[in-house]
Amino acid sequence: MSAILTNALVIGVDGVLALCQDAVRAVDDSSLSDNQQADLRRAAWMAAAQAGDRLAYERVLGESVGVVRAVARRQGVPADLLDDVVQETLITIHRVRHTYDPARSYHAWLSAIATRRAIDSLRQSGRRGRRELHEPLAVEQHADERQANDAAEQAERAAALREAIATLPPGQREAVEQLGLHEHTLAEASALTGRSTGALKVNLHRALKALRNRLHGDH
Amino acid sequence: MADAPNHQSLIHALGADLAPVRRLRPPLWRTLGWTLLLAAMAALLVWHYGLTPMLTRWRGAPDLAWAGVGAVLTALVAGWVAFSLGVPGRPVSRAWLVLPPALLWIGASGVGCLRSWVAPDTVVATMAGARGCLEFILAFSLPLSAVLVVWLRRAYPLRPVLTAAMIGVASAAGSASLLEICHEFDAAATDLAVHALAVGLVIGVNALCGGRLLRPRRSIAAR
């Protein structure tokens, strides 16, 4: 037993390299299924990445994207969050890559991390959902509030306008009522009031100026 | 792969940041370290108290020896499970492996409770004496838990609370094992209750605090 432990201590880097070579050799073994071969290939790449091989690292991360998406989908992550889970998982892989043991399945290691990130994503989106209103509901409620505000404001402005019109001299008030409120033409207003179109225009002009001063304080 | 290009920029950025890392030692290796630590502490206690009192008690009450064996096995298995849980992909069901040695430990200790009734002449623990056991277990569990937490800081436990609870079980069982060397009493109901209280406290505090300590942090950089 102690001899085995001593040997295991001694192998160190050589032992790791041997493991990687074994993994690469195993890829050539046609008796393995495609999934097993892919797993061994990724395990060898990840082992190389742990030693600083950038090319192997980018390859293994690239091949991990599809696996992470599949895991996240199985966990029930909606399509619009899948890319977030993939990115979070890739970043996590980068941070904890030293925890991978090349003698074991890369797929199991990756799936465990992806599952955790998927669950975290679902929890976060659940918390956001509780904090925020559903969008259509929010828009609906917002519109109601705006409409209510607008209606109140309009009623207030209409009352102020009615008061201001009531204070105008009779000629000017008549011009505003006929031309502005009842939307008669100059000819119709002239016929109804018996005033000339020119007088109506002047009265309307003066009435508008007076109303503007009264309502907006323009001088 | 159609969706791979979407993540290519991140993959390139991570690749540019790549540095060689020191691989985390396998759980069995770290369990060996844990075993050596307990053995060293046991050796110190044996050097101070000697083996005779413990062996005398064991000869008189073999169930205490079984309880001691159960505690040692629980400490080692729980330590191994905690280290395993720190590696993504290791089965969480391994936590159940703690159950058999824990049952041996608890069961054999429970049998000892009957001693005061079936063998009235045996020296059993009073409440005051049992308080010493509580202090011993708590005092030893704290540094043992701290050591395990430190050893797991580079790991990535996906279930931090369960991992911390396992650390609690390992350190409490380890303390109870060490207590066997200098225990002055045969097991009694009061003693067992105090042991259970101490172990429960250690596990609970670990699960509460250790879970936070072990929770995966975004700022951890692989070394």
Image (spheres, coloured by chain):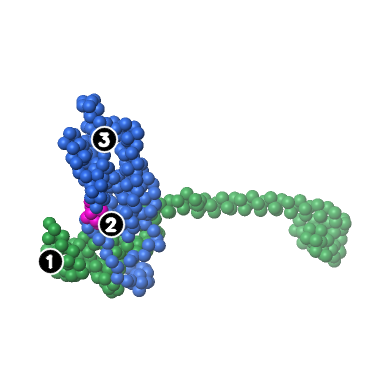
- Chain holding disc 3: B
Q: Amino acid at mark 3?
A: Phe
The reply, left or right, for residue A68 in relation to residue B64 is right
Residue bearing mark 3: B185
For residue A217, what is the image quadrant? bottom right
Which residue sits at x=50%, y=54%?
Answer: A135
Q: Chain in blue?
A: B
Task: Choose between A160 and B125: the one closer to the eye.
Answer: B125
Using the image, tell me which numbered label, if any, was put on residue B51: none
Magenta span includes B35:
yes
Residue B164's x, y, as percent? Answer: 33, 49
* Magenta residue span: B30-39
Q: Are marks 3 and 1 on the same chain?
A: no
What residue would you read off at disc 2? B87
Indicate the quadrant containing the C terminus of chain A: top left, top right, bottom left or bottom right: bottom right
Binning the other alpha carbons within 10 Å of mark 2 as few (below 14), some (14 to 19) or many (20 upward) gives many
Question: What's the mark number on residue A30?
Answer: 1
Our reading of the magenta stretch's main secondary structure is helix
* Lower position in the chain sequence, tag 3 or tag 2: 2
Q: What color does chain A have in the rendering?
A: green
Q: Residue at x 56, y 50 (%)?
A: A141
Mark 3 crowdedness (10 Å alpha carbons): few <14, some 14-19, many ≥20:
some
Are both tags, 3 and 2, on one chain?
Answer: yes
- Under mark 2, the amino acid is Val
Q: Residues within 10 Å of mark 1 (few under 14, many from 20)?
A: few
Which quarter of the picture shows residue A108? bottom left
Tell me the chain of label 1.
Answer: A
Q: Is residue B22 visible?
A: yes
Number of dots carrying numbers? 3
Q: Residue at x 20, y 67 (%)?
A: A12
